[in-house]
Image (cartoon, coloured by chain):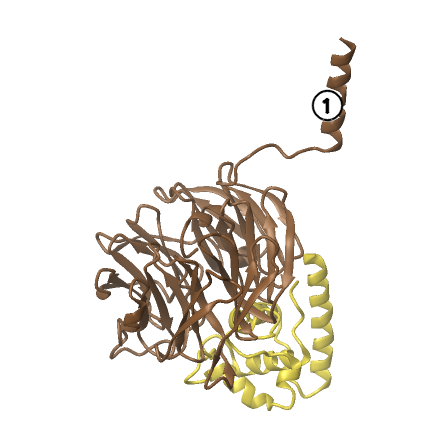
Amino acid sequence: MKQTACAVLAAWLAALASVASAGDDAPAPPEPRRSQLVNMLLEDCGSCHGMTMKGGLGPPLLPGSLAGRDSGALSRVILDGRPGTPMPPWRPFLSPEEARWMIDLLKKGVPHAR
Amino acid sequence: MLARVLMASLALALAACAPAPPLRGTGDLGLVIERATGQVTLIETTGRSAYATVKGLGDLSHASVVYSRDGRYAYVFGRDGGLTKLDMLRARIAARVVQAGNSIGGAISQDGRVIAVANYVPGGVRLFDADTLAPLADIPARFDGGARRAKVVGIADAPGERFVFSLFEAGEIWLVDAKDPRHPRVTRFEGVGREPYDGLITPDGRYYVAGLFGEDGLALLDLWHPEAGVRRILDRYGRGEQRLPVYKMPHLRGWAVAGDLAVLPAVGHHEVLLVDKRDWTEVARIAVHGQPVFAIAQPGGRRVWVNFAFPDNDTVQVIDLPSRRIVATLKPGRAVLHMEFTPRGDQVWISARDDNTVSVYDPESFALLARLKVDHPSGIFLSARAFATGF
């Protein structure tokens, strides 16, 4: 089960890396940082938004729910939080490029880690 | 003679074709949620070992568990609305329903007959027959004149076949009488405070406390006197201090209530609050390593163990209540998510998600007694919860 998940993750990361280099998306960070960011997305973002990003106390972050939203504005939400809501600022832990890369990731769909 | 040999061989043959599990009790059993793989590891605390894995419980990225009154069955509430009844002795799923789109937790009634599940989507509570998981009643968490539904948080069982829970967006506490579980009666308490995020009931079943995210304070309902309504306690506990961003919501279920003291989290502060349970006023506050997530009383009530939110989640601190000092700081692994004591306090089990380990410590000497490999472990739930109100 875990191996399958890892294989899917690896394939998806490879695909993403090629897409990222081809388009105008944020460049994929080098390893091991990339894995740390994916882990942060699944585990720490996932503690409010759900590990499958279908929402929890926080809203869903699925491709359908983010479609058409401005990526720059969304990455600023990651960096600075959303005052008046539980969404905290992640700027102490992420660079603007990393936040933008995570938004690109979410818009394509985060693979389920299971 | 021939008959006796025949009987003996028949008995042997029978035993071989239907190997009954050896007789055993359930008092030392428990389970660990594997949050990434939708499975649970079953554990026993006498030999401190894992004895089985059960798959197929759906999305367990957030999960909680209650036990049947005989401790044999675990009811697992998954993120995806799955409610799974697990046979702890046969190590297999006895029944399972997917009853909502997004769930946060649940409770079992005082008499053990009714399971209540708290849902985010669709916001509300649903009641089920604990035996068959057949649906009994639906309680939509409507507010705003019925126009909206709130996410339900902090559900707990209360004496008198009641359930009590909070409505996040609505700022309400609802008390549900489920004596007739097909026709539950709801008492609403409105305007209890902004964004209740979780709740707990004291071990005696008397007080329900909801933590507020939207303001510094907690909401208290005295179930001996529900007619007196909900009152605010520890109002503006963070006064004058800058509230820090919160990277993980505190979990109130299982928070420490020991003797006359209750230990509560100061949301957005690196502090726990000590409260006198007789009048619910603040006695002291203790500075800790990070933002507390769980504070669990060690059986006996002298010490309280605290874990922390990201990025301080590699640490557990132990507070000695009489001296109000931190007597130990442990590093059980990366991303410590939960701690669970055996009921008489000889062991504490601690999960470290990013190290894929569950560690068992001696709570007195802090010696490591055992370490188990478990995939992305989160909650640890022992069957002794079967006998406690609010667990």
Work out whether residue A37 or residue A22 is closer to the camera in this orientation and state it: A37
Q: In the rendering, at what x and y percent does residue A22 appear?
A: 73, 84
State whether residue B317 is above or below residue B345. below
Q: In the rendering, at what x and y percent does residue B374 appear?
A: 58, 51
State whether residue B290 is above or below residue B190. above
Residue B310 visible, this angle: no
Residue drawn 57% across the image and 72% down it? A41
Residue drawn 57% across the image and 46% down it? B42
Secondary structure at numbered mark 1: helix
Q: How many badges with numbers are in the image?
A: 1
Q: Colour of chain A?
A: yellow
Chain for colour brown = B
The picture quadrant where one finds residue B311 is: bottom left
Residue drawn 47% across the image and 58% down it? B336
Work out whether residue B49 or residue B159 is closer to the camera in this orientation and state it: B159
- Check the picture and name the quadrant holding the C terminus of chain B: bottom left
Q: Residues within 10 Å of mark 1 (few under 14, many from 20)?
A: few
Residue B166 visible, this angle: yes
Work out whether residue B145 or residue A34 is closer to the camera in this orientation and state it: B145
- Check the picture and name the quadrant holding the N terminus of chain B: top right
Work out whether residue B186 or residue A49 is closer to the camera in this orientation and state it: B186
Q: On the image, numbered disc 1 is attached to which residue?
A: B11
A63 on left or right of A82 = right
Residue lying farthest to the top in this orientation:
B1
State whether residue B200 is above or below residue B318. below
Specify the subunit that label 1 lies on.
B
Q: Name the amino acid type tagged 1.
A: Ala
Q: In the rendering, at what x and y percent does residue B264 appear?
A: 32, 64
Q: In the rendering, at what x and y percent does residue A21 appear?
A: 71, 82
